[in-house]
Amino acid sequence: MSGAPPERVDRAERYEPGGARDTALHVRDLHVTFASEAGPVRAVRGGAFDVKPGRTLGIVGESGSGKSATALAIMGLLPGTAAVSGSVRLGGRELLGLDDRAMCAVRGRNLAMIFQDPLSALTPVLSIGEQLAEGLDVHQSLTRAAVRARSTELLDLVGIPDPAERLVSYPHQLSGGMRQRVMIAIAIANRPDVIIADEPTTALDVTIQAQVLEVLRAAQRETGAAVVIITHDLGIVAGLADDVLVMYAGRPIELGGADDIFYRPTMPYTMGLLAAVPRPDLDRSRRLVPIEGNPPSLVALPPGCPFAPRCPLAQDRCREAEPPLVAHAASDGHRAACVRGAEIESRDLSWSDVFPVPAAPPSKLASVPREQRKVVLGVENLRRHFALTGGGLLRRRVGTVKAVDGVTFDLREGETLALVGESGCGKTTTLLEIMRLAPPDGGRITILGHDVQALASGAARMGIRSELQIVFQDPLASLDPRLPVYDILAEPLITHGWRAAPVNERIGELMRLVGLDPDHVDRFPEQFSGGQRQRVAIARALALEPKLIVLDEPVSSLDVSIQAGVINLLEDLQAKLGLSYLFVAHNLSVVRHIADRIAVMYLGRIVELGDVERVFTRPSHPYTRALLSAVPIPDPKLERGKARILLSGEQPRAGATIGGCRFRTRCPTYETLADAERARCDRDEPELSRRGVTDVASACHYPS
Amino acid sequence: MVSTNLLPDAAERARRAGVQRVPKGTLVARRFARNKPAVAGLVIFALLALLALVGPFVARWGYDDLDFGALKQRPSAAHWLGTDIVGADMFALCVRGLGRSLLIGVIASLGITVIAAFVGTAIAYFEGWRERVGMWIVDMLLVIPTFFLLAIMVKGAAGTSGWLWLTAALTIFGWVGYARILRSIALSLREREYIAAARFMGVPSLTILRRHMIPNLGSILIIQTVLGVVYAVQAETGLSFLGFGITPPDTSLGVLIRAGSSTLLTAPWMFLEPAALLLGLSLSMTMVGDGLRDALDPSSASAGRA
């Protein structure tokens, strides 16, 4: 079990007797080391925290910070090749060192876990009832009838409609949100003392996320369990956690109450995170502050504070020894691992003092009003229907999926239009339809004044292609792993007939333009970090000097501190080059930060379209209101005091036909209407129309 | 054509002399050279190829000369590797047989890989009716009695050109099943975003196949080419054994191994010598294949230590 080099345990981190009695989970000096070709990877170095019953601890950190390894070490689910040392006490009982048989009695009974991906965490060949019963039978001896009654009760508790009938359903018959509810039901089945939730809502849409977090709160109330929630989303932590632990490079670097961490952070890394995260409640005048550099490799860590190379406050003594997690302020509960902690505390420094806010370059088109700018992309009544074919030899058409069903918008020079909505609302289909440059099923697409339908010759199409480029979500998937960066960047240029000499020069320019070292052109995509890879993808999109760039979730695969740099780069490029962006995102905080206009989509149609500030501050469509209220704000007071509009149910499948307004099945306004008023929603499909003098249009019969 | 106004400032503009780069071939060669077994395999393969090329000029006997004074002789000064039952020089025979087997194996294997890679990825890449027609043709080819047609083709062309027909026949009938496997692997490739990105850039379909689809099947193709050499030599041996392959006076490793196996107890060198050459050929090809796969795969450890 040992193997990690023993590290000096600091007095403040040492196990305090008496403290363990009323704590549900007590972790001290936890070390996890994995073996790798390059040497031992020290994934967790000195994890230490307590969680009391009924309280919630949020563990935040970027990828590779050791948060998931901490959770798996507590659960005893790490592979045998990993070395784990330290102390994990569950209600006074030491868990580390227990064999698998003894751990089995603890897992599921006293200690439960909720995983990120509910599809792979549930067994596809067993019904939900069987999986719930399995968890109950292992730890309790109940009669069949009692198991059934308890299972039904659990499903009801997590908000699954018709629980008794649902017991015979299989995981694939449920949506993602429903599956995560089942996971929570299984986790709380035996009333555990501690629930560990590892990114429980990362795979879900924002409206479903709000529902699931509500269920998690209910489950905690019901069981009185201590909850450890692991997430990268500061907004979720702000809403749920009583205490927050910030991890960096495998080490806890700041621990305190939620208010301490969010309003009085001590460690510069915590400040950096708060400065880098875009907020849904603030407009884009506040520029994001990226943290320079990348997290260190956990293989050969240099001595000293792991954050020192990226820290604006770093001094020589920061590089000598790793600072212990100690209290710097009056309250003992707030601790930070920073040698300058006391100084930061006494001078009351905040992120704006520590991190320099990068200056925004002036926009070329700032002075030109929107009406006078050229229309770069016009989409009129766009339709894209997919045939739903039955199985069997004849492949009969059994229905139609109206993925995009009458979408109209225009995008002008130098502006950003964001398409938002839940997954399956048709935003990606709209993008691909535009990128295809083929005549659409219905409607019209015009790019720079050219009607796509009228593009007869291949040459004309190639001409348009050079004006229209795309950046995908995951740069690792969108860059050919077999090609060095030089060839990746040269591809669009050579395709469009450039000769070797200007190509070479242009590649040097592009690398500098996106802030990469031109000498790195021989590297393969895998040798770059996530943020750098996305910069390569952006450079490739810029190669032909396009007018319009389509951005498909360009920052959602990046960590917060890296994401801020890429968002700033996109803003700078737009200001410098006068680009237009069509931006698809599910993260509404990012949208508020980067977009000028927003189009909210629901089931293949735009329900609200207009200026970002207006839509965010005064949404008129009930769906927009619900969507916006579901976005977690990284500010504990605002997040807890916020009025949430929880939508009932989930977005119907795209194949479903709903007469009248498509949103009426989930609409909170519809429920408050009188029957006579409802008839209009049932009968007429509302058209997207302007309200008053504003630029905002919404598709609702009864807008607010 | 190149705009300069994109550059942030004058200092940057001064540095604007393009970029230095190492060509991809050099990168792959460097990574290959770091892999010691692969280099050893390449050396063995090069020596075998050299033996096949230069051997006929240094041998004292031709492969079709018979020394009736030395039947079934052990290796000696006169006959370096001994003689067979009719007094032919084993060194000359082995060199000739190695050359034939090498040619047949390498050409057939390369041909199979190239045809299968293009057809397999093309069927996967072009969706819709082209995919259905392509799959139908491939499935039809699979049910043709290959062995029968192969035998007819080779039998029809006797004499010294027989090996060419054999190679062509092995290639023509060898790629079908393999193309089917490659197509199913390529199905997941065509959904990758870099393929979509290339399409949206306007890259022609054939270029996408050549630059993005086929190289990303690289390791599979390389293993296939290497094993394909062994497969082709084995197919040749089997056909020769039944009298449909290489026929005397021409010879090949397969013919020699068959001849040697009948005198394994009385004159083991007749079997061991061609068998050792075949083993060396297969082993070296495997080592080269492994090294190439690692050199072409950016995720492997061939980048060396930092």
Image: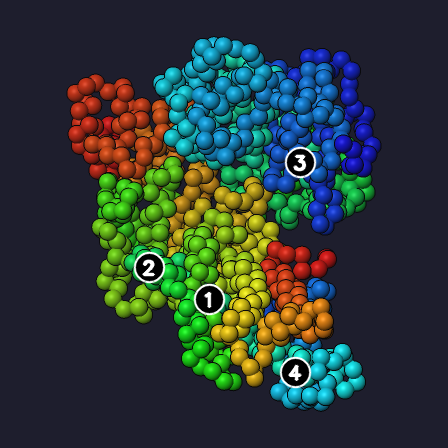
Residue identified by numbered label 2: B136
In the image: residue A654, left or right of residue A237: left
Cβ–Cβ below 8 Å for labels 4 and 2? no
Q: Tell me the subunit letter for badge 4.
A: B
- Observer-side mark, 3 or 1, equals 1
Q: Gap between marks 3 and 1, in whole Å? A: 44 Å
Is disc 1 on the same chain as disc 3?
A: no
Q: Is residue A420 above or below residue B57?
A: above
Q: Gap between marks 1 and 4, in whole Å? A: 35 Å
Q: Amino acid at mark 1?
A: Gly
Of the numbered discs in the image, which one, if any, rests on residue B174? 1
Is disc 3 on the same chain as disc 4?
A: no
Q: Secondary structure at mark 3?
A: loop
Query: Which quadrant does the C terminus of chain A fall into?
Result: top left
Cβ–Cβ below 8 Å for labels 4 and 3? no
Q: Gap between marks 1 and 2, in whole Å? A: 17 Å
Of the numbered discs in the image, which one, if any, rests on residue B86? 4
In the image: residue A272, left or right of residue A552: right
Of the numbered discs in the image, which one, if any, rests on residue A79? 3
Image-quadrant location for residue A597: top left
Image-quadrant location for residue A357: top right
- Mark 4: few/some/many CA within 10 Å (<14, 14-19, 20+): some
Which of the two discs, 4 and 2, labels the residue nearer the N terminus? 4
Q: Secondary structure at mark 1?
A: helix
Q: Gap between marks 4 and 2, in whole Å? A: 52 Å
Q: Is residue B130 above or below residue A642?
A: below
Cβ–Cβ below 8 Å for labels 3 and 2? no
Q: Tell me where residue A438 appears, x and y as whole percent.
A: 29, 58
Which of the two discs, 1 and 2, labels the residue nearer the N terminus? 2
Q: Secondary structure at mark 2?
A: helix
Which of the two discs, 1 and 4, labels the residue nearer the N terminus? 4
